[in-house]
Image (cartoon, rainbow, N blue to C red):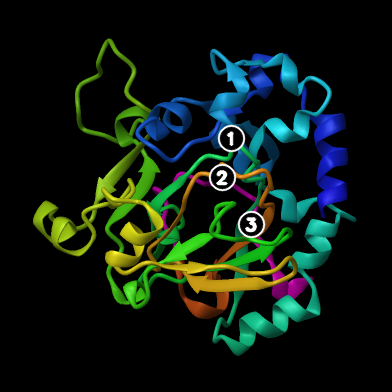
Amino acid sequence: MKKQMKELVETEWHPSSSSNTAVFRTDEGQLKAQGSNDYFLDSATAVHYFAEKDALLGNEELKKEYYQNKVSALNKVGHSLHTLPSSTFHAYATSEKIKTLVHELGWIDPVIPQSMYIFKQSKIGGEVTSHQDSTFLYTTPKQSCLGLWLALDDATMENGCLWVRPKSHLESVRRKFKRNPDYFGNSDKAPSSTPPPKLIFEDLVDVQTQKDICPWEGTLPENHTFQGLLDVGFVPIECKAGDLVVFPGTLDHLSLANTSKKSRHTFQLHLVEGYDVAGVTWDESNWLQYPNGMSFLSILNE
């Protein structure tokens, strides 16, 4: 996977073109970075390249130190790697091992809305703030997101391993990352001279409930040293290259910035139940939407 990703980056990513360059972030700049950018929205059915904010000048031009090694400037690639024909990503996503695992965990009609290759670069690999995956992959009448987090490098506390909060998967989804009805035309509000953001967060629980359960939602705990995370209930998930971490979309998790000299590459699949068998519906306001006539990849049919 690492070899194929490097080949893709070298041949397909041209950061000199502003239409082919975007920053990915999960901090306070997330809505500005993703919420106003067609490049992010269009990645639902494509393979798009998202740089680390510290690797670009003015969010568009690649810094000179990355000219000869573009792959080291990237934060992630997404969100349709699993659909690339004859790729290692497609072969893995549709492998018998994945099918067997997902069925043993109780999923009836698993489909894949998205896949991501995360680089967590040495020195500049940014933090991923506290979140639930179902915030971004919302289904009804129940949450059905399942994350498959494949380590391609050893993941340690020093290079930005996952931190999870045990039993938080029993909590309700607190927010939904959705298409803004004020932008996409299904709102009763009067038009504004200033274009509204394309994507927004919708709170699903009241402010006090969120503060009581998870006051750091969308950020990091105030004290996000190793000990600070342990104090509020997070535990580190250190693992070896080749290990697979599996967890439901309601689990609260995060990762700290990578300031070490070692990268922490991962390939991540997110599955949900499909409607045809399981009766679960993909929320029509989710940020990730396929055009009419296109369906998520069903691993049952591969």
Compared with 188, 248 (above or below) is: below
Q: Pointer 2: what residue?
A: 258
Which region shows up in magenta?
282-302
Amino acid found under the numbered disc labelled 1: Ile
State which quadrant residue 12 falls in. Answer: top right
Asked if the stretch drawn in magenta spans residue 291, the answer is yes
Amino acid found under the numbered disc labelled 2: Asn
Q: Pointer 1: what residue?
A: 124
Mark with earlier residue (2, 3):
2
Q: Nearer the viewer, residue 64 or 253?
A: 64
* Image position of 252 (left or right of 56): left
- Measured Cα–Cα span from mark 2 to mark 3: 36 Å
Q: Residue at x 27, y 10 (%)?
A: 193
Give x and y (percent) for residue 8.
83, 39
Q: Residue at x 59, y 61 (%)?
A: 156
Amino acid found under the numbered disc labelled 3: Ser
Compared with 53, 112 (above or below) is: below
